Image (cartoon, helix red, strand yellow):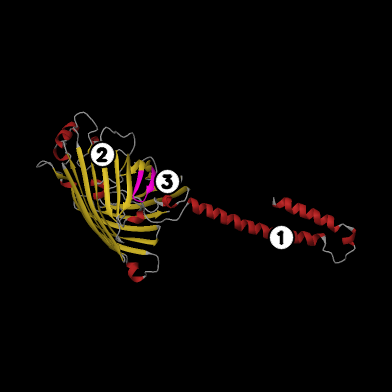
Amino acid sequence: MYRSHVSLLATLALLASTSPAVAQDSDAPTIEDRLDRLEQENAQLRERLDIVSGEVERTELRDLFPEIGDARNGLGPAASKVYGQDRGLSIGGYGEGTFTSESGAKDSTADLLRGIIYTGYKFDDRWLFNSELEVEHASTEDAGAVSLEFAYLDYMSRESLNARFGLVLVPMGFINEMHEPTTFLSVNRPETERRIIPSTWRENGVGVYGDAGGFSYRGYVINGFDADGFSAEGLRDGRQDGSKAKANDLAVTARLDWTDTPGVLAGASVYFGNSGQETAGFGSVGTSLVDVHFQYEHRGWWFRALAAAAKLDDTAQLNAAKGLTGTSVIGDEMLGYYGELGYDLMAAFSPESGRALTPYVRYERVNTQESVAVGMADPTNDETIVSFGVAFQPIDEIVFKTSFEDFDNAPDRFSLSLGYVF
């Protein structure tokens, strides 16, 4: 388009310069002068169009990759980006890489633990889709995997009542819903939120969520656990992850939090359902989990506390059907709790820097055989862990961490990590 304009103007200039009237005027600009001027004007026009084109492209990318805002509706800040869109596609993500050295282990390991892409789409003011696609351990080999962590549709009616349909995160604890690396201090997630609350835990279901009167709530009906995966180490392998899930037994899970005081989150979560899934010999395996949690953030201080308990019915029948005896039996009750304290030194020494340097300490106890028959408890399943470390954030979206975990009944662990969100 630019070349056609230049050619047309050059032709007109040439015709004009050859007319007798112009030829007799000794002060008229030459063809070379006019072509030089046209080239200069064309260069200026191209520069202006490049600037406009760049601005349009940046605007389109800002729409596609919106800024990270606040955590919303039971999701981390980056996972919540689609809720801030007026319409259309939203992309975000996060990643974690770790270095780990365990006492007594022959090898240390370096691992790209997680790479996540969030994809959301706002259809209109009522309907949206949101999803998380995860690559674990940088491959589908050597225990790596590619999986959907969540994929759901929301129907947004009003602030106090909305509906959710699809593969959802079970709304228990701190970590299961909000596990982006910038939202917790340690390299590794607390063991209570791995063994008792088996994060990351997602199932197929339908439910409601909203905010009303200073409280935030979420409640779903989902497919239940599959007790075939239960063990003395906990419930973790009973998750079905939305993949061809047995749905003979459904479960109900709900959460209620007080969120009206700035810096304070206080609440409880529950899960109730059978886990037998009509498997011969298992029984119903009634399964209940409950947790209470509290978080406080103010002027650089960070405090978290959580306690979680699980109770199983029909464990004698389940253990017999699975052929579990001695210290390998599944516990009737499981218990875990921790408290964590941190302080951001930059809040005291350089509050305007935009950086955070937060040393922390955490005390934790977890026992997946809190209640079993006398003599059948495996001491290694009753664990006390003292963790401490430092998290450094040069900007809000990037974090570097170091942690040391002192286990009573397992090798101690030193870890480094990097994390990012976008």
Give the magenta part as a residue range: 153-163
Please say whether residue 61 is visible from this viewpoint: yes
Farthest residue in the left direction?
A: 374
x and y, in percent, of residue 143 in the image = 34, 41
C-alpha separation, residue under disc 1 versus residue under disc 3: 50 Å
Residue 138 x, y percent position in the rendering: 39, 45
Residue topped by disc 3: 126
Residue wearing tag 2: 251
Query: Which disc is residue 41 wearing?
Result: 1
CA gap, disc 1 and disc 2:
71 Å
Dot 3 and dot 2 residues touching (CB under 8 Å): no
Could you tell me which residue is drawn at 48 percent across and 48 percent down?
87
Task: Residue 411: give its label.
Answer: none
- Residue occupying image coordinates x 56% and y 53%: 57
Which residue is found at the position 80% from the left and 54% from the top?
A: 12
Where residue 380 appears, as percent x and y from the top left, is 18, 47
The residue at 34%/71% (across/down) is 349
Give amino acid for label 2. Answer: Ala
Residue type for callout 1: Glu
Mark 2 residue element: strand
